[in-house]
Structure formats: structure tokens, C-alpha cells
Image (cartoon, rainbow, N blue to C red):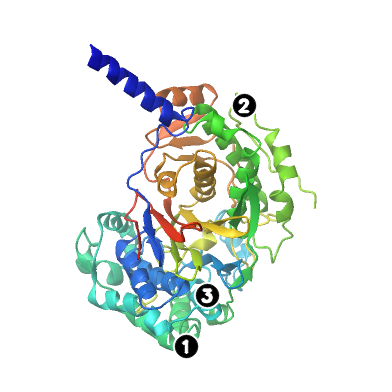
Amino acid sequence: MYKIFVSIILVLWSYALNSQDRVTENVRATRSEVIAQNGMAATSQPLCTQVALDILKSGGNAIDAAIAANACLGLMEPTGNGIGGDLFAIVWDPQTEKLYGLNASGRSPKKLTVDYFRENKMTSIPSHGVLPISVPGCVDGWFELHQKFGSKEMTEILAPAIWYAENGFPVSELISYYMNRSSWLAKFPNFEDVFMKDGKMPQKGEIFKNPALGNTLQIIATEGREGFYEGKVAQTIAKHIQDEGGFLTVEDLASHESEWVEPVSTNYRGYDVWELPPNGQGIAALQILNIMENFDVASMGFGSSEYIHHFTEAKKLAFEDRAKYYADPDFNDIPVDWLISKKYAIERTQLIDPDRAASKLNAGKLETGETIYLTTADKNGMMVSLIQSNYRGMGSGITPPGLGFVLQDRGELFALEDGHYNVLEPGKRPFHTIIPAFITKDGKPFMSFGLMGGAMQPQGHAQIVMNIVDFGMNIQEAGDAPRISHSGSSEPTGEQMTDSGWLSLESGIDYQAIRALMEKGHRVRYSNGIYGGYQAIKWDAENKVYFGATESRKDGQAAGF
């Protein structure tokens, strides 16, 4: 009897210590954080993380390591990224003690207009084929980053990816699964030659080689950005697209330029959260956080119906603005400062009914998905937050002959509606889903992080921040915690929200919370695979060490030395 009594007391005592008003009772970390002094890398593929570490150990800096890892990911995870896609990055430079933002997204063909789609009685841009292709900005992004911050020669940085392309690597179970889902793209010329040996996608453990990609990377390494955007590679890309009925030209490729931009931020309970301005969707995360700051999130408790409801309603409000206003700032006057202001957030907060899910919302009135994410840090304090993508899985399916990669289909996200901020125009950058993030505190680096996955990304960014700031999680727990994903808000292509959408929840949210959410009018479902992929590096200034975290839902690895 005494033993039973003691056991009950211990259980109650443990519950009291760990509940924090039931804040984190549903959170179970898959592992502890990785801690290292001299450098850290976190990517979605262990071999690519090791490549980044090798670059750091041989004297390279965080930029060198990030480019090397990205090149390897384009080979090893072609379902998410590659040199046929776009890139965005945020860099903390310890020399100037400030953040730098790079927008390396490509523009639409100058000869393609909405008239083409209307003449062909098309109401939207196809998801695959030649019509959604925009200029791939990744390679130019590498060279912009390298020119400004890099230390090693590009021949050395790209050497590991070239070696793996020529000699092969074992395909992981997850990537094999996603590659097999894209096997239908074999209907496009050359796709099967690159990715489907003997007419089949590689299986788990099978050695995959892509010598054509290795050759293209060798051209880039020796000839620079011109080796990709001019000369034989550019001519091959343009000719193939035009032969298939597309519009991208050599001139479109040669005239492409990335843009250095100022990151934008909001302060969330003492932490400055940084994103890049449109044409990406990063400021949606800031809008969500601004709205949520008006509530006592910590007292709601992690996983509670109250927290999930308020978060979902904040997301809906931010995404209505996203659908209407986020677009290429070269073609629109986008009042970013107002959208991410505290005053505007208060106005939007007043639209949230604490007891009922909204079924119809409008964008506010203004006063004026597959991807990879990686992060690296070096011994001198430089930290890189980098995201890169083909957009839908393996992109458009269009595979220029002899080059070893697929071109992105990012142009699918253009609207065709006259007057829409994101309407297709010649030489315009489409609305973009991929967003890197960074957190500073008191003007010093705190955390480089990202969470890939289409419309999940700003939702995920906001949840990671609240997990750390409001719920006291460490950076691995913050990524492992059950996620919330709402779909159904209006899209940047012009599609409007007509009902409350779907609220998808991961296992770990208790039934009482789910039942309460349904009573508020939410349509709740359990679903796998829509919650994104997370990597993070945190700087501990007191102990002068890095903490690394990785995505447990993917093949990710965080490692340091």
C-alpha cells in the first residue's frame, strides 16, 4: 500500500513539474540537440550535412558550406530542389554585425503574356510542362553569395557534388518514395534518361548516378555563372523549351540578376523575427505573430483548442492579405511596413471570434509545394539560412537534354486575372512560397531556421517561434512538437476562400481539444506529409557554442565539430 501511495505522489509531482499549465505535455523530442564549438550544419540529407562539415573543417566558411550542401541536395534530393529552381537566403555577417537578404528568384519569359492563355481558353497556368517555367535563379544566387561572402574557390565548393554525381550515392527510403511518386513525369522527353534507369525510379539503397548533372556542375565551377546563363548550357535550355512550345529564351537567361534585399522583421515578445519581403510569403509569418502577440499564448497551453483556434484564425487573416497583396515589388507598390505593423495587427485581431471558425474573410484595407531548407554556421560567427526549390516535387518535368536536371514550374503561381497584384506579366517574378528565417535578440544572432513545405512555411515559422518563446521548448523540441496546418484560404492565383477550410493536425493533439475545435466549426483531419521539413542552428553567446536541430519527419541530420 505504501509503495502504491509513493508511486501516486511521484506521478503527481512529476505532472506538476512538467505540465507548465499543460503547455508542453504533448511534446516528445526525438533526440537531444547537437552541440558544437567550431561549426554546425543542418540539412535534410545526412551525406549533404557531411559535405558541409568537410568544407568547414577544411577552412571554408558558412557560405562555402551552404553552397556545397545545396549542390549535393540538388543531386541527392531532386524531388525538392536543384539548379533548375530558385533560391533565397538570409546571412548573418559577423564583420558588419547585420543581416543580408538575397532574392535569387527568376522572372517570367519576356515573350509570354496572359493573352496567350486567353487565346487558348486557359483559365490557369498548368502545373507542368513548358508554360510554368521561369528563369532558374539558383546558380546566380550561389555566385552572388560567393562573391559577397565566400572564401574557397567554386571548383572546390562544387567538387563533392560532382564526385557524388559521377560515382553515385545510395538513395534513401524517403527520397525513393518521392521519386517514385514523380515517375509519371517520364512522359516528358529526357526525364527518364536522367532519373529512371531501366525505366524505373531508384529504390531504397540503390546507387544513383547522374553524370550529366556532374558535367553541368563542372561547367559552372570552371566558367562561373556565365557557364550556366550563357553559352552552351543556356542555349540547350532555351532550345529545348522552345522546341516543346515554350517561351523562355537565351536572352531571358542572360539578363537574369539576383537582388540583395533588406530583411524585414517584427518583435515578438523581445525576439526580432526576420523574413524577406515579397515576392515571397515570409511576412505572413510576421503577420501571424503580430496577431498572436495580442493573446496570452503561454497560458492557453500547447495543443489546447484555444491556442489552435486562435492560431488558425490568425493564419486565415494573414493568408487573405497574402492572396491579395504579395507579389513582385518591381511591379507593385506593396506597403510591407503597414502589413507587418502592430497597429494593423490589432485591427485584424478584432476580427477573430474566440468561439467560432471564420468561413469567409477579406484582405485588409491598406493605408497606402517541395523544397529543401538548410542552415550552416562557422567558427567566426557567420550563419546562413538558405532555402531552394523546384516548386512542385521534381518541377515542371522539362529536362533539357544532356544537362541532368529538371526546370522549375514556379510560374504556375501567377494569376491570370487583370488587376491582380500577382498577374502574369513579361519579366516578372511570381509569388513565391519558399522563405528562409532568422531570429536576433538585442541585436545579436539567436537562431537561423526554416521550415519548408509550400503554404505550411509561414505557419511553421510562426509555430516554431511560439514553441520557443511562449512554450519554452528547446530548438529540437520546437521542431518535433505536433504541428498545425490549415488549408483553404485564398490563393495567390486568385482562387477565393469559400468555407472554413481544413485544419490538419498531427498525432499528439488530444481528443478533447479536437472535439472542442470541431464544436467551434473547424473541419479537423489527421493527415501525414503536409507539415514541412525543419532545420535550425542556435547560437549560445554565453557558452560560445552552436546548438543544432533537424527534422525528424525527414532524413535530416544536424552535425557539428
Q: Quadrant of residue 558?
A: bottom left
Cα separation between marks 3 and 1: 22 Å
User: Is label 2 in a helix, a strand or a loop?
Assistant: loop
Cα separation between marks 3 and 2: 45 Å
Q: Position of residue 329 (x, y in %)?
A: 68, 63
Residue 109 tag number: none
Q: Are marks 1 and 2 in contact (CB under 8 Å)?
A: no
Mark closer to the observer (3, 2)? 3
User: For the residue carrying disc 1, how many other residues have a C-alpha within 10 Å: few (<14), some (14-19), or many (20+)?
Assistant: few
Residue 145 tag number: 3
User: Disc 3 or 1, which lies upstream in sequence?
Assistant: 3
User: Disc 3 or 2, which lies upstream in sequence?
Assistant: 3
Q: Position of residue 218 (x, y in %)?
A: 37, 84
User: Is label 1 in a helix, a strand or a loop?
Assistant: helix
Determine if residue 560 is in view.
Answer: yes
Report the side of 430 relative to 51 (left or right): right
Dot 2 amino acid type? Pro
* Residue placed under numbered mark 2 in the picture: 354
Residue 231 tag number: 1
Q: Quadrant of the N terminus?
A: top left
